[in-house]
Image (cartoon, rainbow, N blue to C red):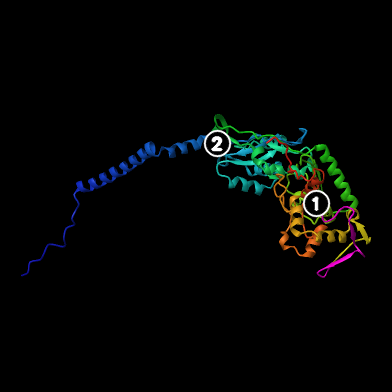
């Protein structure tokens, strides 16, 4: 007989209890060692991280605005001043308001709820909810009792002369930085430097203590212009009247002191009111046409042609010039006088503004000689008044002139200039040929 086997399978092998305990204990040791090492690293090696996180819970840096310098006329009359206004600010993570409060705040600030939400959402640590608002508007906003909403006194720009001196002075933007005119050109002089202060806040985002002034604000400096406010007012009034009388689209007027080159008045029309900040001013109203726009001077160039010819000795005041029937053809192009007058003295050519007579005299001059006279009078060069965007006009090199071009340039066609250039050029007739540097500033910088 076969004996029956009593073995049904191999018995499982069990890990010794001591081994499993060792593995668990070792893992715990490694874990605690890692935590201890990390704590040691943060406390002794990279402790700036923990300090920064801690300070972020209770301290903030707040900008301190700088007082912008005044712009004055030559007699000390204010053309631009900074007045105290209010700005509303908050820490976005501490700002708490209901939908109803948000809607009401947008109404008080005269903006849309969506625009206000976007402004707050785009900020990280600090946001100006509204800048440079009247004190009464800030009071109505704070009366809504919105948690985390604060106010501070800043400065807003005001222009006493308004539209009369707008193109000279320019204006500032919402951050009180120059955007146009002298405000832009002299930003470094007028703007100063903003400061900052560190404050402690509570859990509701309210400032409870000033810790320190990190950087004190540095006020801007006053700037005196060569402009005379009284002459500026008269210039603007007369310019507007002339434009209305002649139904012109635009115009400019410049008053210069021939002895010093100082601009005493500079007016443009149409104009704008720099005290309005609603952004609805048409761009063409903001152009300082007297410095940024060029035109063909026309017959106002004839005295310069006369000066070049007299200085070169090719004519005298009594030299007879035959203008014939009032027409002159050069290379297939015909130059005409508005009123034919026959033979004239050179003096009469200028008096009667004869295109034909002026062209004949110009063609008797070397092109280089004529170009030099115009260049020495400032044509083709930037006036360097200190105003941003001023242009040089166009005076092509003499070597590129053809006879017909030399003839037309003599009476102001084929050349371009801005109004200040032309006014400055005319000062040579009052200073024995000396061209003064033209400026918008008194010598105080």
Residue 293: tell me if it is visible.
no
At which x and y percent is residue 213?
A: 56, 31
Taking the magenta stretch, the answer to whether it contains residue 228 is: no
Q: Dot 2: few (<14), some (14–19), or many (≥20) neighbours within 10 Å?
A: some
At which x and y percent is residue 252?
A: 81, 49
Name the residue beneath numbered marker 2: 61
The range drawn in magenta is 312-333
Toward the viewer: 329 or 228? Answer: 329
From the viewer's perspective, is 206 left or right of 156? Answer: left
Position above or below: 445 against 341? above
Position above or below: 150 against 411? above
Position above or below: 199 against 265? above
For marks 1 and 2, the one nearer the N-term is 2
At which x and y percent is residue 31?
A: 31, 44
Structural distance between the alpha carbons of marks 1 and 2: 69 Å
Give the residue at x 59% y 47%: 122
Q: Quadrant of residue 29?
A: top left
At which x and y percent is residue 159?
A: 76, 39
From the viewer's perspective, is 426 left or right of 117? Answer: right
- Residue 90 badge: none
Name the residue beneath numbered marker 1: 311
SS of the residue under disc 2: strand
Position above or below: 204 against 11? above
Residue 397: tell me if it is visible.
yes
């Amino acid at each position: 007989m076969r004996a029956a086997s009593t073995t049904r399978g191999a018995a499982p092998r069990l890990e010794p209890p001591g081994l499993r305990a060792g593995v668990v204990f070792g893992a715990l040791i490694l874990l605690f060692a890692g935590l201890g090492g990390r704590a040691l690293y943060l406390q002794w090696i990279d402790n700036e991280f923990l300090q920064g996180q801690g300070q972020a819970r209770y301290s903030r840096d707040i900008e301190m605005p700088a007082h912008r310098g005044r712009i004055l006329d030559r007699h000390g009359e204010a053309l631009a001043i900074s007045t105290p206004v209010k700005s509303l600010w908050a820490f976005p993570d501490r700002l708490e308001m209901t939908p109803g409060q948000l809607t009401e705040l947008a109404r008080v600030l005269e903006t849309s709820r969506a625009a206000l939400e976007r402004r707050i959402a785009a900020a990280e640590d600090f946001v100006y909810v509204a800048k440079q608002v009247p004190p009464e508007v800030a009071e109505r906003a704070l009366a809504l009792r919105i948690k985390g909403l604060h106010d501070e006194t800043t400065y807003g720009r005001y222009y006493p002369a308004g539209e009369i001196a707008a193109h000279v002075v320019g204006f500032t933007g919402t951050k009180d930085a120059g955007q146009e005119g002298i405000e832009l050109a002299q930003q470094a002089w007028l703007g100063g430097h903003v400061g900052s202060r560190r404050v402690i806040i509570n859990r509701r985002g309210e400032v409870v203590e000033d810790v320190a002034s990190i950087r004190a604000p540095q006020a801007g400096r006053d700037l005196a212009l060569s402009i005379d406010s009284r002459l500026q007012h008269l210039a603007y009034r007369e310019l507007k009247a002339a434009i209305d009388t002649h139904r012109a689209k635009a115009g400019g007027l410049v008053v210069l002191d021939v002895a010093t080159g100082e601009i005493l008045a500079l007016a443009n029309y149409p104009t704008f009111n720099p005290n309005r900040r609603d952004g609805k001013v048409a761009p063409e109203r903001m152009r300082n046409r007297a410095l940024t726009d060029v035109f063909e001077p026309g017959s106002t160039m004839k005295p310069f042609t006369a000066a070049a010819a007299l200085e070169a000795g090719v004519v005298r005041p009594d030299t007879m010039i035959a203008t014939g029937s009032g027409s002159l053809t050069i290379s297939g192009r015909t130059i005409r006088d508005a009123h034919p007058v026959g033979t004239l003295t050179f003096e009469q050519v200028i008096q009667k503004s004869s295109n034909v007579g002026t062209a004949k005299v110009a063609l008797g001059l070397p092109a280089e000689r004529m170009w030099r006279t115009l260049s020495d009078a400032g044509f083709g060069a930037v006036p360097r008044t200190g105003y941003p965007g001023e242009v040089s006009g166009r005076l092509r090199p003499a070597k590129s002139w053809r006879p017909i071009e030399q003839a037309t340039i003599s009476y102001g066609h084929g050349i371009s200039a801005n109004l200040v250039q032309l006014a400055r050029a005319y000062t040579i007739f009052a200073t024995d040929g000396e061209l003064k540097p033209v400026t918008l500033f008194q010598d105080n910088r």
